[in-house]
Image: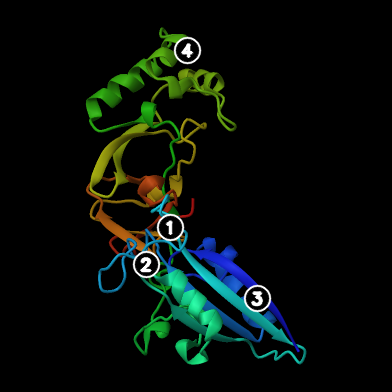
Amino acid sequence: MAAVYGLTGIGRAGHSAAAPTRQCGHESVRYRAHYLETFDSIWIDSLNGDKYKTGKQTPDGASDPSIFSTESNHEGIQVRTAITLLSRHAAHRPEGATVKHRSLWGGDKRPQLLQSAKDWRPSDYQALTPALGLGLPYVPTAASAGYLSWPALPDLFPISFPGVKTSRDQLVVDIDRDPLEARMKRYFDPKVSDEEIARETPSAMAAQQRFDPRAVRTELLKRGTSAGRIIPFAYRPFDVRWLYWEPTTKLLDEKRADAIEFSAPATIWLVGQRRPRRQELRVIGGLQTIEPDYAVAARWGIHGQGGVVMPGPGKMTLEAVSI
């Protein structure tokens, strides 16, 4: 006797086990580990049709629409879909579930599923052995024999920093240095009222949960610009701007002082991402500092996920995102 559970799941980045796998990263690994421990058999019908992973194309380039595509709605949904069958026997085996997988492609997936209901063949499925080092994927994967023994990025770069998060780009960031200097001179001019600053640069005087704009400006006006400085700002890949970096108050939402002080001319930085949403992409770029001070923006991350910057050996002796 077996308890059988049927789940229709939506997954990204190669994860098509069940509904929770819409989340990529550590959470989905825990879900998949739990399923392996709880059930004896896991059968997956991957219906593909993913806009982000495959561009809704089959491996040979033909159209691969969503299973939810209809005559009146050709787009269906954007992410891939899977039907997952999980079974647990009365005499449950604690050593873990067997995982079987098959992929259905193209525009005739629905007829294929209906045919399977009449003539179901276990031989249509591929047996999988999910590897923990790869995140326990429930899809076919391939890696070189020694891949799982390779050092991880934290082993190679023991020191890392999240990127700077301003929350007030309109005030403290600019493509050109001169307009930024002029704007900050206005901000630090006690003769210019808060109301004038608000009209000229609304985000500078817009209250947020951790930012009282009037109190911050009052404190900074008392101190002056002596502690702040304008530095290069790696805003996005191939997009270096200028940042007024302020070490006190909450003018910058997240200052990342450690990263700023660590930078030095000719330091090579690797920029990566802890938990990307839509792609199995971890390292997204690199840069080399050319000034004594240098900042990397939190927005270096893609799809809303923060970037993590790791300094290379340029400044290191024996020592070396997610927002």
Location of mark 3 (residue): 34
Callout 1–callout 3 Cβ contact below 8 Å: no
Question: Label 1: few (<14), some or many (≥20) within 10 Å?
Answer: some
Q: CA distance from mark 1 to mark 3?
A: 32 Å
Q: Secondary structure at mark 4?
A: helix
In percent of width and height, residue 131 lies at 49, 83
Compute the Cα span from label 2 to label 3: 33 Å
Marks 2 and 1 sit apart, C-alpha to C-alpha, by 9 Å
Residue at (53, 86) in percent of width and height = 120
Q: Mark 4 belongs to which amino acid?
A: Asp
**Which structural element holds mark 3?**
helix
Mark positioned earlier in the residue sequence (4 or 1): 1
Q: In terms of depth relative to the viewer, which is nearer, 19 or 31? A: 19
Horizontal arrangement in the rendering, residue 36 relative to residue 59 (left or right) = right
Residue at label 4?
194
Spatial CA distance of label 2 from label 4 is 60 Å
Q: Is residue 92 left or right of residue 134?
A: right
User: Which of the two residues, 52 or 131, is positioned nearer the viewer here?
Assistant: 52
Marks 4 and 3, Cα distance to the nearest angstrom? 55 Å
Mark 2 vs mark 4: give the one in front: 2
- Residue 14 appears in the figure: no
For residue 212, above or below residue 306: above
Question: Helix, strand, or loop for circle 2?
Answer: loop
Residue of label 1: 69
In the rendered image, which residue does mark 2 sit on? 107
**Cβ atoms under marks 2 and 1 closer than 8 Å:** yes
Q: Nearer the viewer, residue 30 or 100?
A: 100
- Residue 1 coordinates in the image, percent (x, y): 76, 89
